[in-house]
Structure formats: structure tokens, C-alpha cells
Amino acid sequence: RNFFLPGLIVLALVAVAIFLYLHRPLRVADAAVTHTAVLPTHTVFAAGSMVVGSQHQTEDEFFVLATVRIANKLDLPIYIKDLTGTLTAPDDSDITTSAIEKNNLDSLYITFPSLKPLATTPLLRETGIPPGQSAEGMVLLHFPVDQAAWDQRKSATIAIDLYHQPTVIVTIPKP
């Protein structure tokens, strides 16, 4: 039997695989949290009537303002589809939330005026990042927990979902 032609095909496939391995990055993008600010809030709602007496309901809200930098490692543009945050509690339960969208920021700053001084330019959905370039901006996350739950967390991450590429996960560091 003649093995010249099958050997030549295998050699060509190996050469193509080596070429692709050497000229394609292993990662789509690098991402990091460069700065984090937090704002815990505690709201007391008065409920009840004069006959029954006064009862109060409380609500804890925790805002995380994370500045994220994402660098495109591909030779084609990447586009941000969605931004979500996940908080893993000490009991391994997860709380996942979508990042606050740009059109909701102004009303949130009115409701929680302490957020405005902490805020920077947001990292927006649909942002395009050209090849070899990077984008940076604030990702504002809202978790229905208190400061103690945040401090005792196992982890907190931001998932940057990209169009036509794998999701990039970045960890929010503990102080």
C-alpha cells in the first residue's frame, strides 16, 4: 500500500493546526476589576394603622459599583451583549442580578442620591471593542442583601456576555 497521500494529508492538517495555534490568541479577552465602591442602604417602611399600632418593614439594598476594564485579544471586534453579577453566600447559595442599564441610572440616583458621587462612566451593553483595544467603565450591581452578607460572601463575580464569543468572568476582589 502507498501511504504517501494519507501521510501528506495528515502533515498538512498538522501544519494548519500549528499555524492556528500560534496565530490565534488562547483567550478572547482579558478583564479585570480596577476599582470597587459599595453603598449599603437600609430602608424602613412605616406600615399599619392607628388602631392596630405601628409596624415597620425594613429592606436592605446593597449596591456595588465596579470599574471593569476589558481588553480584546482577538483580531476582530467583540461586542458586549449583557453584564450580570453573581454573589455567592457562605451557604453556597447564589444571587444573580443584571447590571443596571444606562436609562435607569438617573432615576436610581434620585432615589439613592449617595450613589451619584460614587458613579463613573458606565460600561454599556452593545459596546464594541476593536481588535487590540480595550474598554473601561462602571458596572452597577444591586443585591438584596446587607453589609454583613457582602462581607461574608464566598465570592462575587461579573459575567461579561459577548456576542459570538464565550462569556468572560471577572472576580470582584475582597478588600
Image (spheres, grey):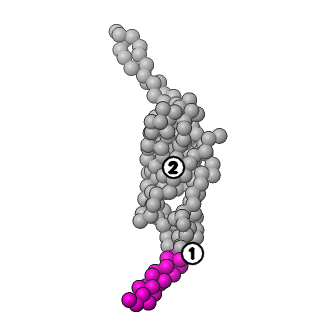
Quadrant of the frame with the N terminus: bottom left
Residue placed at 56% from the left, 48% from the top? 171
Q: Position of residue 108 (x, y in %)?
A: 48, 42
Q: Position of residue 49 (x, y in %)?
A: 35, 14
Of residues 140 and 89, the one drawn nearer to the viewer in this rendering: 89
Q: Few, some or many C-alpha atoms within 10 Å of disc 1 (few <14, some 14-19, many ≥20)?
A: few
Q: Which residues are magenta?
A: 1-20
Q: Is residue 22 visible?
A: yes
Q: Secondary structure at mark 1?
A: helix
Q: Quadrant of residue 64?
A: top right
Q: Is residue 116 magenta?
A: no
Residue placed at 54% from the left, 64% from the top? 27
Quadrant of the frame with the C terminus: top right
Left or right of 1? Residue 90 is: right
Give the vertical position of 42 relative to 71 (above or below).
above
Give the vertical position of 60 relative to 129 (above or below).
above
- Identified by mark 1, the residue type is Leu
Q: Which mark is residue 84?
A: none
Left or right of 173? Residue 15 is: left
Q: Quadrant of residue 166?
A: bottom left
Q: Position of residue 75 (x, y in %)?
A: 53, 74
- Identified by mark 2, the residue type is Ile
Most common SS among magenta residues? helix
Of residues 68 and 5, the one drawn nearer to the viewer in this rendering: 5
Q: Which residue is mark 1?
A: 22
Q: Which mark is residue 158?
A: 2
Give the vertical position of 165 relative to 24 (above or below).
above
Residue placed at 34% from the left, 9% from the top? 51
Which marked residue is nearer to the observer: mark 2 or mark 1? Answer: 1
Q: Secondary structure at mark 2?
A: strand
Residue farthest to the front, as pictured: 1
Left or right of 23? Residue 2 is: left
